[in-house]
Image: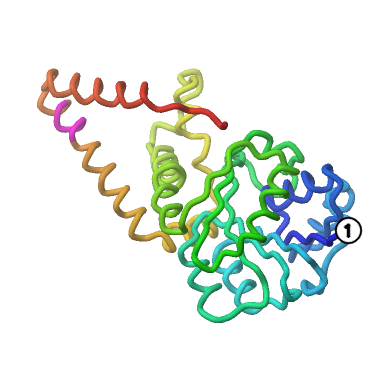
Amino acid sequence: MKKTLVIGLGIIGGSICAALTKAGYCVDGADLNENVLSLAKEKGYIQNAAKDFSRYDTVFIAVPPKATCAILDSGVFKEGALVSDICGVKSEIERVVYRKPRAYRYVGLHPMAGKETSGLSSASPDLFNGANLVITLSNHTEKSAVDEIKDFAKAMRFGRIVECSADEHDKKIAVTSQLAHIVSNAYVKSPQVNDCKGFTGGSFQDMTRIAGVDEEMWSQLYLNNKDYILSELEGFINRLIVYRDAIKEEDETQLKAALKEGKLIRQRIKYTKK
């Protein structure tokens, strides 16, 4: 059986280990934290702690962007190995990978799954059940590598698989993920948030659920996707100004129009994993 390695055993890396192990794969793990490695073995998510990356046929890299780039650029992998990252940005990753010839076959991945909590303790073999998976392709991507990735995706029980360029991925993810996290993080900074006991409901929970970002990782994601996230932020700010001005000027007609426009757009959007 081919040997599989997952580098970085946080919620996503740990869940890859757990899901593939559950599906019958032989999975080893690598992490800077020895306690995390011990816990992964204790849970049965991995068989061994890996030291030599070149022994593996397939490698999933589940660490923040800077570390991912460093591993992809300097790591020693088995010739012909399938190497995939799961970063939330892809253009910068591709630039690093393709700036010189590589012995490995690269495919970019982005599992559209997660929780408001992080770390191996939040990992689950069922995290990806029915979830979307984005595969990024370029002129350098080998078909054999994509076919193998899809076999892994099936084993992890992903739902819809979307294929696109790195640039399209980064443009879309700026609004579907990155802007949403910024808005949530900014929203909780209202001074009133500290004293809302008894006044919160579903809307408050929805707005605050993803505010607790890992600042080390998310700051890297935002800066690596600077142009698209700035475009989305500026557009969002401009749209908020419409509501602000309508309320300030007591312009009920404009306020109703803005609210109705948003309502109709929401009704047209299909929110489904599959």
Give the answer, above or below, for where 217 lies relative to 74. above
Q: Nearer the viewer, residue 197 or 98?
A: 98
Q: In which quadrant is the N terminus drawn?
A: bottom right
Residue type for callout 1: Met
Could you say which is closer to the camera, residue 242 or residue 265?
265
Q: Residue lying furthest front in this view?
A: 143
Q: Check if residue 244 falls in the magenta segment.
A: yes
Residue found 73% across the figure and 46% down from its top: 15
> Where's residue 93, x and y in %?
52, 66
Q: Is residue 75 left or right of residue 18?
A: left
Q: Is residue 84 above or below residue 194?
A: below
Please state which of residues 121 and 45 is positioned toward the viewer in this rendering.
45
Q: Position of residue 83 (x, y in %)?
A: 67, 65
- Location of residue 138 in the rendering, given as x and y in whole percent from the top left corner: 50, 63
Disc 1, SS = loop
Using the rendered view, name the quadrant where residue 113 is placed. Answer: top right
Q: Residue at x 73, y 76 (%)?
A: 79
Residue range in magenta is: 242-246
Q: State the image coordinates of residue 208 (x, y, percent, origin top left).
A: 48, 34
Q: Callout 1 environment at 10 Å: few (<14), some (14 to 19), or many (20+)?
A: few
Q: Which residue is mark 1?
A: 1
Is residue 54 in the magenta section?
A: no
Q: Main secondary structure of the magenta part?
A: helix
Quarter of the image with the C terminus is top right
Is 245 drawn above or below residue 112 in the view shown?
A: above
The figure's colour scheme reads: rainbow
